[in-house]
Amino acid sequence: MVLEDDQSMDTGLGVVVVIPTYNECENLAPLTVRVREVLPDVKVLVVDDNSPDGTGEIADTLAAESPEKVAVLHRPEKQGLGAAYAAGYQHAMQLWPDARCFIQMDADFSHDPSLLPSLLEAVKEADLAVGSRYTNGVSVVNWPLSRLIISKLASTYARIVTGLPLTDSTGGFKCYRLEVLRAIDLSQIRSNGYCFQIETSFRAWRKGFRLKDVPIVFYERQRGKSKLNLSIALEGFLIVLQLGAERLFRPSTGCNPRA
């Protein structure tokens, strides 16, 4: 099915990019510039968790320079990636009610802005496009072997337990159609670390929305520090088990209006 607004998405019209930040003062400005070079009409929402390095102030400056295209949601403290995305999507839907597609990406250039059009192309036919590091072998640059193994095992574990038809269920470079975000009820998402990516995709899939892998190259951050820790990994392990049990014992609730 091809929607009437597909051509407008080529320039980012009706598209919002949500970027959560915590201590990304070196990356935020050049990333925002690059995103808007790739998609001239895109809206950008920065969700900052009161970064002590001044990232929030940089975001305010960017918004002041382009008030129609850039906005900032300030949160009082670091509350986790999942909570940041949930709050960001809800705020973006209120701020730009005409938006039809919502893209999430990391602030550290791990996700290449030049691939944004590929995600938008995918949601011309799918409802949720997920950038995958593992569609064609392994497409990761400058990761240590240990981290690559953990990531691959986590994604494989999630796919086997939940049944998700994705090669990279933990990836954070994603594009949702508006209908998906409305249907999955962000207020009920339990995950707050990288498992947020798994749970939101799982909720969409269980409601009958169409998911599609989009091959990407993932780059290790050049500046700043990774936010991954043991508690986030443990949360992911336990919530995936819960999702797997839900898949076995609860019927899916297909509600996709485009199916």
Image (cartoon, rainbow, N blue to C red):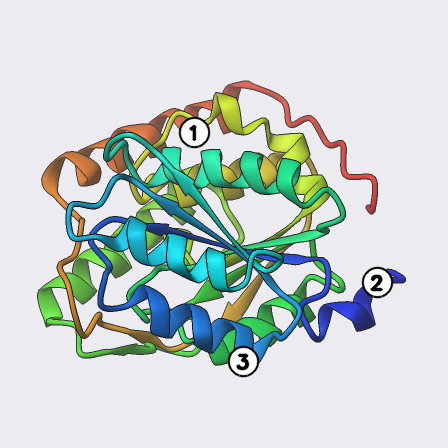
Q: Label 2, label 3: how many angstroms apart (C-alpha)?
A: 21 Å
Residue 133 in sight in this render: no
Three-letter code for the amino acid on which mark 3 is drawn: Glu
Counting from the top left corner in percent of width and height, residue 49 is at: 29, 40
Of label 2 and label 1, which has the lower sequence position? 2
Nearer to us: label 2 or label 1: 2
Farthest residue to the right: give it. 4
Of label 2 and label 3, which has the lower sequence position? 2
Q: Which label was assigned to residue 243?
A: 1
Residues packed near mark 3 inside 10 Å, few (<14), some (14 to 19) or many (20 plus): some
Q: Which residue is labeled 3 in the image?
A: 37
Residue 66 in sight in this render: yes
Q: Label 2, label 1: how many angstroms apart (C-alpha)?
A: 34 Å
Do labels 2 and 3 touch, CB within 8 Å?
no
Residues 205 and 43: in front is: 43
Nearer to us: label 2 or label 3: 3
Three-letter code for the amino acid on which mark 2 is drawn: Asp
Residues 34 and 251: in front is: 34
Identify the residue at horizontal 39%, vertical 52% (top origin).
60
Identify the residue at horizontal 34%, vertical 53% (top origin).
155
Three-letter code for the amino acid on which mark 1 is drawn: Leu
Quadrant in the picture for the N terminus: bottom right
Left/right placement of residue 98 relative to residue 21 reads: right
Q: Quadrant of residue 239?
A: top left
Of label 1 and label 3, which has the lower sequence position? 3
Q: Secondary structure at mark 1?
A: helix
Q: Which residue is labeled 2 in the image?
A: 5
Q: Label 1, label 3: how many angstroms apart (C-alpha)?
A: 39 Å
